[in-house]
Image (tube, rainbow, N blue to C red):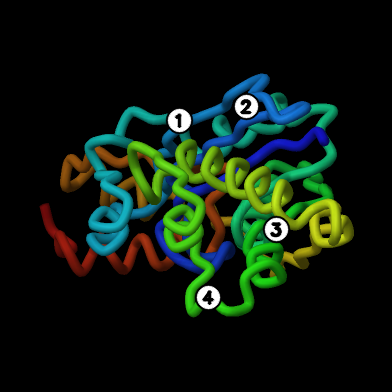
Amino acid sequence: MKFTAIDIETTGLGPEKAKIIEIGAVKYEDGEQREVFSTLIRPQTAGIPERITELTGITDEMVKDAPGEAEAMASLLRFLKGETVLLGHNIPFDFSFLKVAAGRLGETFEYDGIDTLVIARHCHPELPSKTLSAMREVYGIRTERAHRAYEDACAAAQLYFAMYEQYGEANPAWFEPKPLYYRPKKTEPVTKRQCSYLQGIIAMHGLDLTPDYETLTKSEASRLIDTLLAKYGRKG
């Protein structure tokens, strides 16, 4: 079996509004790691929500010099070239964010997926929780950090191998890749007026913030402007 285990960390739950702040991807072939991709991403927002920092440990300081979404996604797409199967725990979530981000670059993002969450539900209907953390405990999978992209991608792959060893021979269909689908909502690009206004706010307050105007949407720009005005006011 050949696949790429992948995981992301984000600023929220909706791919049209929240942003990716970390991607971890590991290519596997015949049960062995082949290549690794890992990067933090500087989100085009006013900052990482406190609840996300508490969950992941990722801070604004950690991502301030990280690549923006466009650069990170371009690198990921090069890494995934020729790959056809993505594996992850609740892989449709990760896929939705990555597809939307790829779409902002004008790129397609079409893959089959193996979802270890769905497999866990087949293998362990008796368990009250099938989160990645819960399943790691069941199978004794140890990682240095939870809720970090590279570590969670590796944990999902190890979980797949462990469940396959116990249940794969009798239930091969559970472990087969299936097409991944997500239809992104239509978004409007940021307007020239919004760009100019946003640049003015940033300059007026001397903020260390560099939005990616090529990928910023109209609604994202509006929310960012409102957030900055609420935090810093209209005057310098």
Mark 4: give few (<14), some (14-19) or many (20+) Cα within 10 Å: few
Which residue has dot 4 on it? 127
Q: What element carries label 4?
A: loop
Q: Which of marks 1 and 2 is nearer the N terminus?
A: 1
Mark 4–mark 1 contact, CB under 8 Å? no
Spatial separation of the CA atoms under disc 1 and disc 2: 10 Å
Mark 1–mark 2 contact, CB under 8 Å? yes
On the rendered structure, is 184 left or right of 173? Answer: left
Q: In which quarter of the image is the N terminus?
A: top right
Q: Report the disc number at residue 115.
A: 3
Considering every residue shown, the one lying at the far left of the view is 236
The residue at 68%/67% (across/down) is 123
Position in image of residue 45 (x %, y %): 37, 53
Amino acid carrying label 2: it is: Ser
Spatial separation of the CA atoms under disc 3 and disc 2: 24 Å
The residue at 81%/45% (across/down) is 108
The residue at 39%/30% (across/down) is 66
On the rendered structure, is 74 left or right of 82? Answer: left
On the rendered structure, is 76 left or right of 48? Answer: right
Position in image of residue 57 (x %, y %): 26, 47
The residue at 87%/56% (across/down) is 172
Between disc 4 and disc 2, the foreground one is 4
Q: What element carries label 2?
A: helix
Amino acid carrying label 1: it is: Pro
The quarter of the displayed image where residue 171 is located: bottom right
Which residue has dot 2 on it? 75
Which residue has dot 1 on it? 67
